[in-house]
Image (spheres, rainbow, N blue to C red):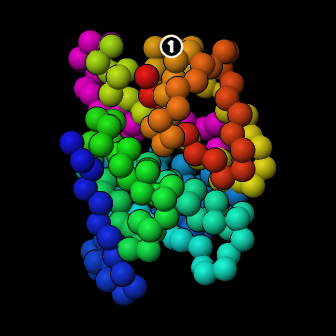
Amino acid sequence: MTRPVRVWREGDVPPAARVLPIATALACGEARPLAEALRARAPDGDEIFTWGDVPPAGAGPAEARRAIARVIVSLSLPGVPLLPAAALEAPAAARALAATAHPGFDPFARCTFPDAGPALFVVVRDGATPDQPPLVVQRSRVVCVVNVSGGDELLSLDWRALLGTRNAIRDLLTGVRFNVHGPSVGLAGYQALWATV
């Protein structure tokens, strides 16, 4: 199943859209306020539209990585992402959009927002229902992590509880498989990881 994405141009954001200002929320490299706002929202099933932005022409590498991280945060969130048309021109954003075909990105997937520290934004997306066999639940789960700061960060999660493994995790964004020995994974500044088995 391909996850629907709505693309907008300046001035075309639907008036009824519930818009979360991702760029503003993450401008200071602090993920907690956004995660707290998402945890506090009413579970009414309404779509949450989000946007990311792209770096201005001539932006340096750090600004480009920061802008792509905001797009990837947008694609990680529940509901139907609303992205600027220019966002889809970035290769990293295009790869992220292709990765949303995973069952964990079903628009109706259950999402939780664990606290992994001030600079790490984490969304656990469940595409299966809890009454399904554990293996099905784990294989339809994606742990989306974005380091919203410019510095290196260490992510500590219980990978066995989340994905049923402490090794052989696959990153949907890069296609790379890697082993997690223990609970920690290092993320460089503005790096994103969409982990699954």
Reply above or below: 80 against 58: above
Relative placement, left or right, of 195 versus 125 is: right
Residue at x-position 47% and y-position 35%:
175
Residue 84 at what x, y percent from top left?
Answer: 41, 73
| Quadrant of the rendering where the N terminus is positioned | top left
Furthest toward the bottom, the residue is 11
Residue 58 at what x, y percent from top left?
Answer: 66, 80
Is residue 79 or residue 7 the one in the foreground? 7
Residue at x-position 61% and y-position 81%:
57
- Amino acid marked by disc 1: Thr
Identify residue for label 1. 165
Residue 196 at what x, y percent from top left?
Answer: 44, 28
Find the magenta span and give its range.
110-134
Q: Quadrant of residue 111?
A: top left
Residue 97 at what x, y percent from top left?
Answer: 38, 53
Relative placement, left or right, of 192 versus 94 is: right
Number of numbered discs present? 1
